[in-house]
């Protein structure tokens, strides 16, 4: 799942007032004080399915359903209430020559979730790897997509952990110590943590450009691959989040595409 907006803590188990949008998302103004209703959650879920073809687990609609259920169970909102928040919508945008699409979820024109997904249609088979792409997106191709989409971002520890996990899923655990994309990414992340300013930092593109040609072996992305990479990225991020357009997001998108 692409990176969602950081969320505030919702009301605790002993709920005395309904969970509002401002309790779950960083929104302001009138929307922040509106309780989340079942109709709101249903509207967001429908919009997600229309644009993305599915409703992401842990995405805005999923969070809204949980909040609305809590509100109804606590007797703080009417389960048959009419929608209180207009402007629930999901949009998509395809940057020119970028090979990706950006999906944005909004409430009253304020962003509550955003995903960057690669467009793998028409990607040629990998030449540098020993595994031939037979109708599925490979880990190498996914890393190439990350370089195109999030390449200008400096690498941090979470990115390095995700790159290392993806490489191990493709190549195996027999990489020599200090060798490969994962080792290069970790070195870059350590350097970036000490760099005097952003202009001196190593970016994702510096490490992942032509990644599919650098892997000694490659494989089709599976759900298990995506799960392991996402877990590695989230565990190493201080906010337990993923990079927009980063390795975890792209692996998840590739796994979904391969599954269908």
Image (spheres, grey):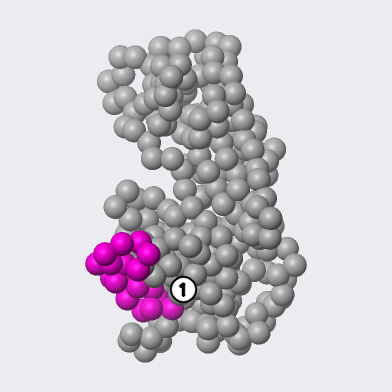
Residue drawn at the location 70% of the way across and 70% of the way down = 123
Taking the spot 37% from the left edge, 26% from the top edge, the residue there is: 23
Tell me: residue 58, above or below residue 12. below
> Which SS type dominates the magenta stretch?
helix
**Residue 30, quarter of the rendered image:** top left
Residue 176 in view here: yes
In the drawing, does residue 37 fall left or right of residue 101? left
Density class for disc 1 (Cα within 10 Å; few <14, some 14-19, many ≥20) is some
The reply to whether the magenta stretch includes residue 223 is no
Looking at the image, residue 221 sits to the left or right of residue 243; the answer is right
Name the residue: 34% across, 28% down.
10
Query: Residue sitting at 54 percent across and 24 percent down?
Result: 108
Q: Vertical placement of 202 versus 174: above or below?
A: above
Disc 1 designates what residue? 206
- Which quadrant holds residue 235? bottom left
Q: Residue furthest right?
A: 122
Q: Nearer the viewer, residue 56 or 34?
A: 34
Q: Is residue 110 left or right of residue 24?
A: right
**The magenta stretch spans which residues?**
181-200
Q: Position of residue 260 (x, y in %)?
A: 69, 57
Percent x, y for residue 97? Answer: 68, 60
- Regarding mark 1 in the picture, which secondary structure is present there? helix
């Amino acid at each position: 799942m692409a990176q969602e907006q950081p969320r505030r803590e919702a009301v605790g188990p002993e709920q005395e007032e309904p969970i509002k949008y401002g309790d779950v998302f960083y929104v302001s103004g009138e929307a922040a004080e509106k309780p989340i209703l079942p109709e709101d959650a249903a509207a967001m879920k429908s919009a997600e399915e229309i644009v993305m073809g599915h409703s992401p687990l842990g995405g805005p609609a999923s969070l809204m359903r949980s909040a609305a259920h809590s509100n109804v169970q606590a007797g703080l909102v009417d389960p048959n209430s009419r929608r209180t928040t207009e402007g629930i919508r999901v949009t998509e945008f395809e940057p020119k020559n970028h090979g990706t699409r950006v999906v944005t979820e909004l409430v009253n024109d304020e962003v509550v979730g955003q995903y960057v997904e690669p467009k793998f249609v028409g990607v040629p088979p990998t030449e540098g790897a020993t595994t031939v792409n037979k109708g599925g997106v490979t880990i190498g191709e996914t890393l190439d997509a990350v370089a195109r989409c999030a390449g200008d971002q400096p690498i941090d520890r979470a990115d390095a952990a995700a790159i290392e996990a993806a490489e191990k899923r493709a190549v195996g655990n027999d990489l020599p110590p200090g060798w490969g994309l994962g080792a290069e990414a970790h070195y870059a992340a350590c350097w970036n943590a000490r760099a005097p300013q952003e202009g001196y930092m190593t970016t994702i593109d510096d490490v992942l450009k032509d990644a599919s040609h650098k892997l000694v072996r490659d494989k089709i992305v599976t759900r298990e691959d995506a799960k392991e990479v996402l877990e590695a990225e989230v565990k190493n991020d201080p906010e337990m989040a993923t990079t927009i357009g980063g390795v975890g997001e792209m692996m998840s998108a590739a796994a979904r595409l391969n599954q269908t």
